[in-house]
Amino acid sequence: MLINLPFTRDLQEMQRNLEKLILSYLKMGFNPYIDVIHDYEHYHIHMDKIVYLEKCQRVTEIHTTDGKVYRAYQPMYKYEKLLPESMFFRISQGAIVNWRFLYHVKGYRAIIRWGKDKTADLPVSPKVYKFVKSQLSYQTGDRP
């Protein structure tokens, strides 16, 4: 699992942030699956398989690593509360991305890559653009 900690050069502050994150995980009963009703059937989707969530009008589309797209009528803000902050981040009003699959950010666009040749291009909100770009460069070591 990818741990998303704020960047700091102070080791004591980094340790405090890590301790807070670990304690918050221990306090909550973490369930790695989310429940989705798609085409009148109930599915359990593992969070590691979720690449990104995208809002399409009143439907939330959940894109997974195996290429399936689950369409759910639950609003994005409910998924934002449900998914752990260390794994997922809302890059715009209409998209939540798994940090693991975020490949590149440029010109208020995010490139998501998974599998051998699957990619997606999503908009990034100006409010979070600098944060996403800095976190991505910190986590990947300035990938082109």
Image (cartoon, rainbow, N blue to C red):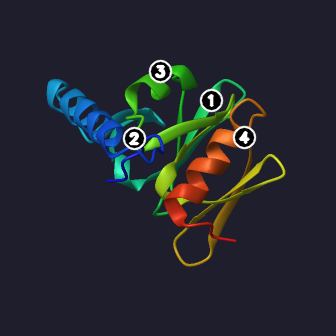
Q: CA distance from mark 1 to mark 4?
A: 25 Å
Q: CA distance from mark 3 to mark 1?
A: 12 Å
Q: Residue at x 53, y 64 (%)?
A: 140
Tell us which disc is closer to us: 3 or 2: 2
Q: Is residue 75 visible?
A: no
Check contact, mark 4 vs mark 3: CB within 8 A: no
Q: CA distance from mark 2 to mark 4?
A: 17 Å
Q: Is residue 142 visible?
A: yes
Tell us which disc is closer to us: 4 or 3: 4
Quadrant of the frame with the C terminus: bottom right
Q: Which residue is mark 3?
A: 78
The amino acid beneath tag 1 is Val
The amino acid beneath tag 3 is Lys
Position above or below: 76 against 1: above
Q: Earlier in the sequence, mark 1 or mark 2?
A: 1
Q: Earlier in the sequence, mark 2 or mark 4?
A: 2
Q: Secondary structure at mark 4?
A: helix
Q: Secondary structure at mark 2?
A: loop
Q: Earlier in the sequence, mark 3 or mark 1?
A: 1
Q: Which residue is mark 2?
A: 86
Q: Which residue is mark 1?
A: 59
Lateral position of residue 40 relative to residue 44, left or right? right
**Picture disc at residue 129:** 4
Lateral position of residue 133 relative to residue 139, left or right? right
Check contact, mark 2 vs mark 4: CB within 8 A: no
The amino acid beneath tag 4 is Tyr
Q: Position of residue 138 (x, y in %)?
A: 54, 56
Q: Residue at x 36, y 48 (%)?
A: 3
Q: Earlier in the sequence, mark 4 or mark 3?
A: 3
Q: Position of residue 21 (x, y in %)?
A: 28, 34
Q: Earlier in the sequence, mark 1 or mark 4?
A: 1
Lateral position of residue 46 relative to residue 37, left or right? left
